Amino acid sequence: MTDLIALAERVEALSGPCRETDLALHCALFPDGDIAKTVKRDWRGTGQPGVRSWDLTSHGVFCTETRDERGDVWASGSQPLPHLTGSLDAVTALIAEKLPEWRWEVRRSEAVVARVWRLRRRDESYDRADCESYAATPAIALLAAALRAIDNAP
């Protein structure tokens, strides 16, 4: 099982948005990005003297700081962390970036169902790269389906 499939299963099990899962997703999807590098390299939990550290705020913003040995902050910064588990806009932006030319749909019957698929270029018929997910919310269902599609994408 790949990391993305394991994350898709973790996402499907959510009952609502989760910023810790958003962080894990961001690090898996963008391993060479600043956030992933910081998470791998630095200490979690701001306020530690003599270290570079990071944490998530209550609003889900990724914050970094560097303190000297006395505990004084001499560098700090922050950047927004995409709210993938709670926002259809964030998930559709991810699909546009990672799965260009793929289509998606979300529908609700007894459960929320999302599907992501690729169209063939010439005749625009359905391709076999079709990923579906059932989850608690539209964003979570679409995200899980997208993770499976990203994992299967050529």
Image (cartoon, rainbow, N blue to C red):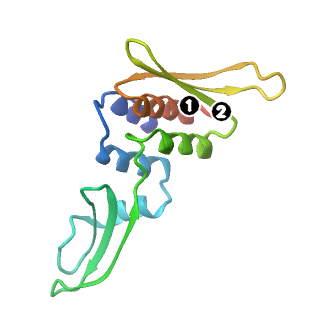
Which of the marked residues, 2 or 1, is nearer the chain's N terminus?
2
The amino acid marked with disc number 2 is Trp
83 vs 88: above or below: below
62 vs 76: above or below: above
Q: The residue tagged with tag 2: helix, strand or loop?
A: strand
Closest to the observer, 35 or 17? 17
Kindly identify the residue that appears in the image at 26 percent across and 60 percent down: 57
Check disc 1 and report the residue beneath it: 149
Q: Residue furthest left?
A: 70
Check disc 2 and report the residue beneath it: 102
Which quadrant would the N terminus be assigned to in this image?
top left
Kindly identify the residue that appears in the image at 24 percent across and 56 percent down: 58
Mark identifier at residue 104: none
Which quadrant would the C terminus be assigned to in this image?
top right
Q: Position of residue 118 (x, y in %)?
A: 67, 28
Kindly identify the residue that appears in the image at 60 percent across and 46 percent down: 97
4 vs 30: above or below: above
Kindly identify the residue that appears in the image at 41 percent across and 61 percent down: 35
The amino acid marked with disc number 1 is Ala
Q: Are marks 2 and 1 in contact (CB under 8 Å)?
A: yes
